[in-house]
Every structure is written in structure tokens, then in C-alpha cells.
Image (cartoon, rainbow, N blue to C red):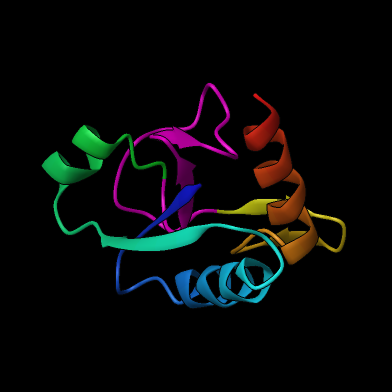
Amino acid sequence: MEVTLLYFDDCPSWQTADQNLRAIATDDDFTINRVEVTTPDAAEALRFRGSPSIQVDGTDLFAEPDEPVGLSCRIYQTPDGPAGSPTADQLRAALAAARGA
């Protein structure tokens, strides 16, 4: 499985998402591609819903239908409240669901 981490450099939360993905990649069988999104046109083309975004086969694992596309930091609802990145457990669950789809 190929996981794509989309981010823009000014958002500090992408590094947490990257760290969480690398931690669980040792348990699961997937590779991580990192894609820096630098322009509004690239954000639109990639359906980038904010930094960080995690995609499998071009599908955002955490997308909500009404989330806008663009260069912004993203907020995730975690068990501990709003955060800039999904937890490792949330990533594991989302990847397992994507694998089963």
C-alpha cells in the first residue's frame, strides 16, 4: 500500500503526522510518499484539504464532504480533542479501513 502525506511547509503539524506514519509503517506494510503542496492550483489538483492530509490511492482518509480545498492547516478530532494531526491509532484504523475497501 502506498500512503501519501500531503503538506505545506509552514504548517508544523505535518511533521507530527509524518512521525506517526513512520512509527506505524514498521508494523504495517506500506510506503510513505511526501508531497509538498505549494500553490493553490496544486491544492485544487490534489484535492488538498489542508496540511497534513493523508491519502491512499488519491482518497483522503479523513475527508469530510464540506471541507474546503486549499492551503491551510487542518484540524482533526482526536480522543483528546482537536489536534493538528490524527493520532497513530486513528491512522492505523483509517489505513485498515482503506485496506479492506
Kindly indicate the quadrant of the structure image that contains residue 83: bottom right
Name above or below for residue 22 compared with residue 50.
below
Is 41 drawn above or below residue 5 in the view shown? above
* Horizontal side of residue 21 vs 53, given as left or right: right
Q: Position of residue 42 (x, y in %)?
A: 16, 44
Nearer-the-camera pick, 40 or 19: 19
View extreme (front): residue: 29
Q: Is residue 66 magenta?
A: yes
Direction from residue 66 to residue 83 in the image, left or right? right
Magenta highlight: main SS: loop
**Residue found 72% across the figure and 58% down from its top:** 82
- As rendered, which of 25 and 66 lies closer to the eye? 25
The span shown in magenta is: 50-74
**Picture residue at 68% right of the left edge, 68% below the top:** 24
Question: Measured from the top left, where is residue 63 in percent x and y?
Answer: 55, 34
36 with respect to 100 (left or right): left
